[in-house]
Amino acid sequence: MSSAIDVSTLWKTFLVGDGRVDALRGVSFRLQKGEAAAIVGESGSGKSTLLHILGALDSPSSGSVHIGGFDPFSGTDREVSCFRNSHVGFVFQHNNLLQEFTALENVMMPALILGKKDFDVRTRAQKLIDRVSMSHRAHHFPGQLSGGEQQRIAIARALINDPLLLLADEPSGNLDSVNAAKIHALLLEMNKDFGTTLVVVTHNLSFASTLPRVIEFRDGIIVRDSRSSMNEAEWSV
């Protein structure tokens, strides 16, 4: 099975005043195509920094990152942006839906930006909206949707370009426990049905323990990497 993510000796350093902060310190790991993993750890441990680099939203200070065999940072800014839009889907805690567009239009947007044909994009977007059980809300605006419904639309939007990676950063952080559980189940379902590699940064240890792999960060390094579900009490966060 081919690697979807191959990270080797990854460092990320931020300059803060007269000093420096090493957010990531020589991190190395691989995820296979179709694998699902949770990234856990205390605030400031490097989780979100890693996710931003995997999504080509930020670049590493040193080390290497390969996504589907490609180095997303080897090209121009425009090429990096194109790679990100083509191969990475994002689901954030704050879903970032565009308020002036309907749910269907929000799902279509990343594909239209790539210049894909409107008819093809609309057809796939409608299928994805059906797939996340939101067909009855396709023509509603984000302000007319509940928080859980908005996250369902955000998941559909993240899948519109058939990405290599689906990255989720605290996807249920703003939801009550019932809707959070539904979003967690939906993410795992999409991973299984579409075969898209899933990486989730989460503080929800109950959710993390349901994923087949859990990677724990502390102070910018990996302190535990388990390929089997563990009792959440075993995690130090």
Image (cartoon, grey):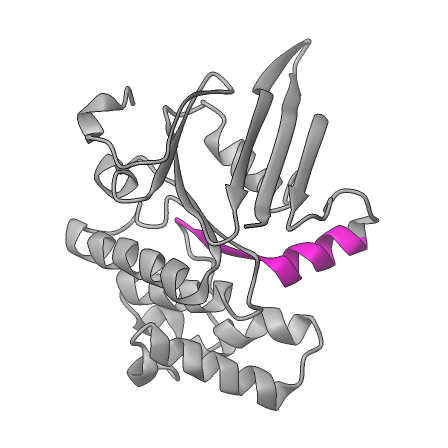
Q: Can residue 168 be seen here?
A: no
Tell me if residue 39 comes above or below residue 109 in the rendering. Answer: above
Q: Nearer the viewer, residue 130 or 144?
A: 130
Outermost residue to the front: 1
Figure quadrant of residue 41: top left
Q: Residue at x 35, y 57 (%)?
A: 187
Tell me the residue at 33%/43% (across/down).
212
Q: Quadrant of residue 149?
A: bottom left
Judged by its main secondary structure, the magenta piece is helix
Please report the bounds of the magenta region as a residue range.
78-93
Looking at the rendered image, the quarter that the C terminus falls into is top left
**Apparent side of residue 93 relative to residue 197 in the rendered image (left or right):** left
Q: Can you give x and y, in whole percent of width and height, for residue 228 in the image? A: 30, 36
- Can I make out residue 19 in this image? yes
> In this picture, is 16 found above or below 40?
above
State left or right for residue 28 relative to residue 15. Answer: left
Q: Residue at x 26, y 37 (%)?
A: 229
Q: Is residue 115 above or below residue 31?
A: below
Residue 175 x/y as whole percent: 25, 52
Residue 44 versus residue 9: which sits nearer the camera? Answer: 9
How far from the left and from the top, in percent, is residue 121?
57, 82
Task: Residue at the far left: name it.
Answer: 178
Instruction: State yes or no: residue 86 in magenta.
Output: yes
Q: Position of residue 232 (x, y in %)?
A: 21, 30
